[in-house]
């Protein structure tokens, strides 16, 4: 079945009122099936659509409204606008919690629209994203997929079973390449301070973006590390090829990098194709704090918009404006706080405004799960400190022009 028009007809036959539909991750969007969903969802009352990372074309965000409602814990730019306009919803859940809820049948998923990798008999390679799609497939009433022969064959413990698939659409154009934001202006200084917080041979969660891009420089000359994370980008190539990441995540398995999602350049997609150093896994594994905390010296590295004097972090909103999301940061931070550490790194000022504040607007990482805060002015090591001691440590790494105001806030 290769006609996208057939997809709309088949989806219309499968949908029921008030269904919840999971659309696979924005890095592997099934854009033909998304077009079909937009066409037919308005004729069915109460349709709810969940997408974890809306960093693709965000056509669901553009169409979300009276016909169907989009919900996500990790909104992209257009989705944030839709949420602010009341046309879409922010899901205040971590990926780990969502994966567990789906796995236990507590979060109902009625249908899955996916984009998978090359077929293999009655199965398919998972492509570049597994996150909550795999547990959802076990629970869903129906499954429609785009089988993309151009996606890399990334190693996984098992392929995706297609025997229960209700519709297959074949394509071969492969994944979209993503370019990252410009590097942090103070990246070299931040990298040095981040390195101070990472123990030898630690298992790392590094995420994606401007902080992750610092890791090859931060860990230059080291070896013995492994990566267990939710998302990898191009920096993973340098980490592995420089020998920084050179040991298995789990003893007895070959993978030195375990991730739920891959997003980056075409070079990255070629590099992961058939590469035994990398393994794709779903969020039941990758975002499970109990599992992660058992990994050798597991250390989480996350960014934030703000951190307050107690060490609470905010990755969601500033000035009442939705600027970020939730994702899996709390899953990784929880695990890191019990193991090798939970690091939050950020520049002391963003857009001329302080990043170290008396109290954050929204708490997305409680101070209980933050062990280190890093700015260009140093490291606040928070483990074992009282609130008074934490405030002093945080003021010491704030921008010098903000420190008097912060001391005044403590006195008040």
Image (tube, rainbow, N blue to C red):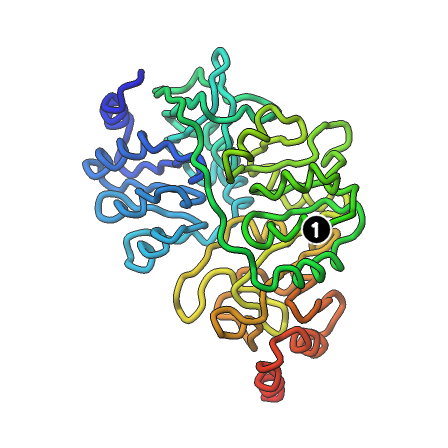
Q: Is residue 343 above or below residue 166?
A: below
Dot 1: what SS?
Answer: strand
**143 vs 98: above or below:** above
Residue 225 or residue 362, whichever sits in front: 225
Residue at image position (44%, 15%) is 163
Q: Is residue 369 visible?
A: no
Residue 1: in sight, yes or no?
yes
- Pick the quarter of the image with the C terminus: bottom right
The image shows residue 219 at horizontal and vertical percentages of 73, 50
Residue ID at (38%, 25%): 146
Q: Position of residue 10 (x, y in %)?
A: 26, 23
Q: Is residue 262 left or right of residue 299?
A: left
Q: Along the horizontal axis of the image, is 336 left or right of 269?
A: right
Residue drawn at point x = 67 percent, y = 30 percent: 277
Residue 78 is left or right of residue 74, and the answer is left
Q: Position of 229 compared to 327: left or right?
A: right
- Marker count (numbered): 1
The quadrant of the picture occupied by the N terminus is: top left
On the image, the x and y values in percent for residue 110 come to 37, 32
Whole-percent x, y for residue 111 in the image: 37, 31
Residue lying farthest top?
Answer: 121
Quadrant hosting residue 388: bottom right
Crowd around label 1: few <14 · some 14–19 · many ≥20 (10 Å): many
Residue lying at the far left of the rendered structure? 43
Q: Residue at x 43, y 60 (%)?
A: 323
Would you name the residue on which mark 1 appears? Answer: 299
| Residue 368 occupies quadrant | bottom right
């Amino acid at each position: 079945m290769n006609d996208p028009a057939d997809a709309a007809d088949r989806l219309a036959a499968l949908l029921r009122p008030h269904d919840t539909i999971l659309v696979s991750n924005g890095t592997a969007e099934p854009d033909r099936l998304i077009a079909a969903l937009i066409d037919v969802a308005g004729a069915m009352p109460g349709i709810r659509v969940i997408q974890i990372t809306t960093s693709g074309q965000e056509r669901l965000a553009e169409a979300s409204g009276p016909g169907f409602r989009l919900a996500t814990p990790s909104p992209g730019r257009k989705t944030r606008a839709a949420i602010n306009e009341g046309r879409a919803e922010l899901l205040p859940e971590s990926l780990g919690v969502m994966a567990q809820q789906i796995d236990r049948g507590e979060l109902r998923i009625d249908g899955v629209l996916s984009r998978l990798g090359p077929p293999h008999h009655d199965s398919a390679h998972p492509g570049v994203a597994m996150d909550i799609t795999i547990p959802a497939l076990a629970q869903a009433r129906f499954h429609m997929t785009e089988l993309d022969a151009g996606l890399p064959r990334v190693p996984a413990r098992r392929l995706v079973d297609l025997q229960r698939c209700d519709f297959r659409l074949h394509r071969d154009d492969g994944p979209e390449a993503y370019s990252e934001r410009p590097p942090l202006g103070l990246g070299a200084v931040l990298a040095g301070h981040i390195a101070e917080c990472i123990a030898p041979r630690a298992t790392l969660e590094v995420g994606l973006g401007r902080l992750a891009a610092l890791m090859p420089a931060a860990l230059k000359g080291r070896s013995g590390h492994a990566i267990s994370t939710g998302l990898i980008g191009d920096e993973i190539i340098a980490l592995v090829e420089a020998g920084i990441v050179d040991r298995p995540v789990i003893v007895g398995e070959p993978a030195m990098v375990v991730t739920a999602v891959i997003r980056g350049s075409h070079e990255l997609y070629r590099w992961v194709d058939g590469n035994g150093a990398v393994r794709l896994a779903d969020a039941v594994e990758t975002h499970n704090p109990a599992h992660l905390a058992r990994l050798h010296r597991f250390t989480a590295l996350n960014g934030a918009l703000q951190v307050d004097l107690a060490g609470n972090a905010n990755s969601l909103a500033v000035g009442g404006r939705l600027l970020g999301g939730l994702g899996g940061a709390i899953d990784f931070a929880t695990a890191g706080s019990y193991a090798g550490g939970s690091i939050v790194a950020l520049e002391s000022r963003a857009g001329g405004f302080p990043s170290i504040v008396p109290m954050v607007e929204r708490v997305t990482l409680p101070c209980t799960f933050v062990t280190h805060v890093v700015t260009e002015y140093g490291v606040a090591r928070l483990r074992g400190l009282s609130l008074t001691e934490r405030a002093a440590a945080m003021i010491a790494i704030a921008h010098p022009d903000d420190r008097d105001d912060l001391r005044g806030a403590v006195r008040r």
